[in-house]
Amino acid sequence: MVGVLIVEADAAVLDSTATYLATEDYDIFQATDSTLALDLLYEKKPHIDVAILNLSLRKGGMDKIGLELAHQIHAFAPDLPIILTSSNPQALRGDERNLFTAIITKPYQASDLLEAIKSAAPRIPDDINRRPLGPTGVPEAQ
């Protein structure tokens, strides 16, 4: 099962995205802020194959916290694909756009997000470098 880290401050969007992707057989990890997102990534890295990151746009410019998170994810996991969802992706500079495997403009169709995930992280067989997570979220012993 492909693991997806969803970083979204809007609880309703986070919940609906997670619910939809879970019905599509993705293993979901949810974070509402950059601190929780990094904690999950550090703890669950072997189980996360793609990150979906929302960059909040504030009046007057880009929310630098979201860009910092993308840089931190790349520093820790340079091969991890990051999909950006944003209502104003035009605010990104060229070098900032290079942080993302795909950029999806909000509002978007669920099918657009699913296609971006499939393109970014093809399904990986469960038996390759994978162990099921136990009830505490820690991989079970083999």
Image (cartoon, helix red, strand yellow):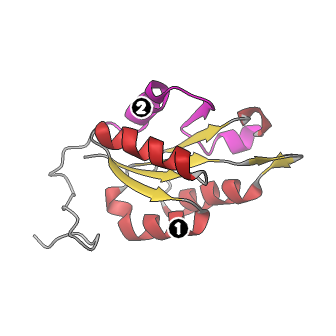
Residue 52 appears anywhere in the view: no
Q: Is residue 111 placed above or below 10 in the rendered structure?
A: above
Residue 111, image x, y percentages: 44, 25
* Residue bounds of the magenta highlight: 93-122
Q: Is residue 31 left or right of residue 95?
A: left
Q: Earlier in the sequence, mark 2 or mark 1?
A: 1
Q: Is residue 59 placed above or below 37 in the rendered structure?
A: above
Identify which residue is drawn at 64% across, 41% down.
98
Residue 46, image x, y percentages: 32, 61
Task: Give the CA distance from mark 2 to mark 1.
Answer: 23 Å
Report helix, strand or loop for mark 1.
helix
**CB-based contact (under 8 Å), mark 2 and mark 1:** no
Quarter occupied by the C terminus: bottom left
Q: Circle 2 is placed at which residue position?
A: 114
Residue 8, image x, y percentages: 57, 51
Residue at the far front in the pictured view: 12
Q: Is residue 13 left or right of residue 62?
A: left
Identify which residue is drawn at 38% across, 62% down.
45
Which amino acid does the dot numbered 2 rest on? Answer: Leu
Which amino acid does the dot numbered 1 rest on? Answer: Leu
The one of 136 and 42 positioned closer to us in this rendering: 136
**Number of residues whose C-alpha sits closer than 10 Å to that of mark 1, classed few (under 14), some (14–19) or many (20 or more):** few
**Number of residues whose C-alpha sits closer than 10 Å to that of mark 2, classed few (under 14), some (14–19) or many (20 or more):** some
Residue 9 appears anywhere in the view: yes
Whether residue 68 is in magenta: the answer is no
Whether residue 119 is in magenta: the answer is yes
The one of 128 and 43 positioned closer to us in this rendering: 43
Residue at the far right in the pictured view: 60
Q: Is residue 26 left or right of residue 88?
A: left
Report helix, strand or loop for mark 2.
helix
Residue 121, image x, y percentages: 38, 40
Task: Specify the label residue 36 is tagged with.
Answer: 1
